[in-house]
Image (cartoon, helix red, strand yellow):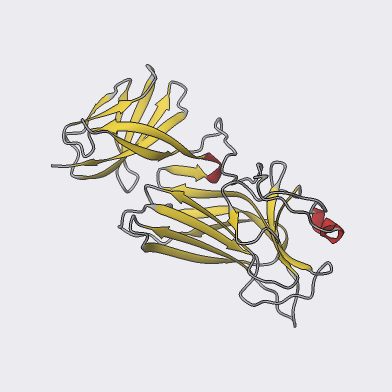
Amino acid sequence: MKTSQLIFLLIIFPCFINAQENGGFEAWDNLHTHTYPDEMSMNNIPDVISGLPTKWKSEYDIGVARTTDAYSGEYSLVIHNWYNYANESISYKKAIQNIPNTISGYYKYIADENDGIYPTGLGKVVITDSNEDTISLTNFTLDTTSVYQYFEFNLEQTNHQPDSIEIIFTNAENNYSCTGLTINVCNFLYLDNIELSFTTGIISLNDLSDNLITSYPNPATEYINFDIDKDEFHVEVYDMTGELLLIDKNNKRLNVSELPTGLYFVRIYDEDFKVVGTNRFLKKY
């Protein structure tokens, strides 16, 4: 009997918090340690700071820091130009099973005016399939603002099956030069509480997990079985549009014989209706 172990996405609930992926930028990776000079004390950026946020990557260590000037929690992320180098970027890549509807979060952008022109912060969401071909590409911009603002952008949709998502933020437009708001540092893009919204709920980057859940057989024809170490639980089955099709309770063997051929998603809750895992399976015949 062949089993399939699939990476699952934890749907966010008020009672569930996990800062591992740093959508709120609370935890930091000490492998990337660097020190900024005294002029970085501007805009509440610590003059000595170490670390890039775990799971978020940057081409260079310079230009990425954390700040206590956060929208919520203790910290947020800030990206800036350093010595007139534009396009300091961070990126985040993760496996996904369905395409999000939107990306949202909070930001502020304190930028350096150049000949009467202010730059914009840039965002990009790239979704690829298992062949690493791009099947969805969404670009958006963030205007200058001295206070935190909410942003939300719709993501390009497609019928192709996604395999991974990459989110990229850049602090300034291409080749935009700056005179330096504080010596040689300028264009401060703050980011906090980055989230992806799906039809079936909201997923926070804080809550993406690498835990595995096992189901079999996959593809399924009549029944699908789940390995779950709980006696009290609830199961919900959704189609690709997010419509709820099946509900069951305390049953590790689910009858799916009446479902049409297609791809389906499963959410499993504990007795307190906290999501303990999700999965997907293919129904055939």
Residue 10: tell me if it is visible. no
Above or below, comparing residue 83 to residue 57 in the picture? below
185 horizontally vs 133: left or right:
right
Of the 4 image quadrants, the one containing the C terminus is top left
Above or below, comparing residue 267 to residue 204 in the picture? above
171 horizontally vs 219: left or right:
right
Residue name at image x 57 percent, y 39 percent? 20
Residue at the outermost left position: 285
Residue name at image x 63 percent, y 45 percent? 24
**Residue 80 spot, x, y in % from top left:** 71, 63
Residue name at image x 40 percent, y 43 percent? 200
**Residue 192 spot, x, y in % from top left:** 64, 50
99 horizontally vs 50: left or right:
left
258 horizontally vs 199: left or right:
left
**Residue 23 spot, x, y in % from top left:** 59, 46
**Residue 122 spot, x, y in % from top left:** 59, 66
Quadrant of residue 186 in the image? bottom right
Above or below, comparing residue 189 to residue 215 in the picture? below
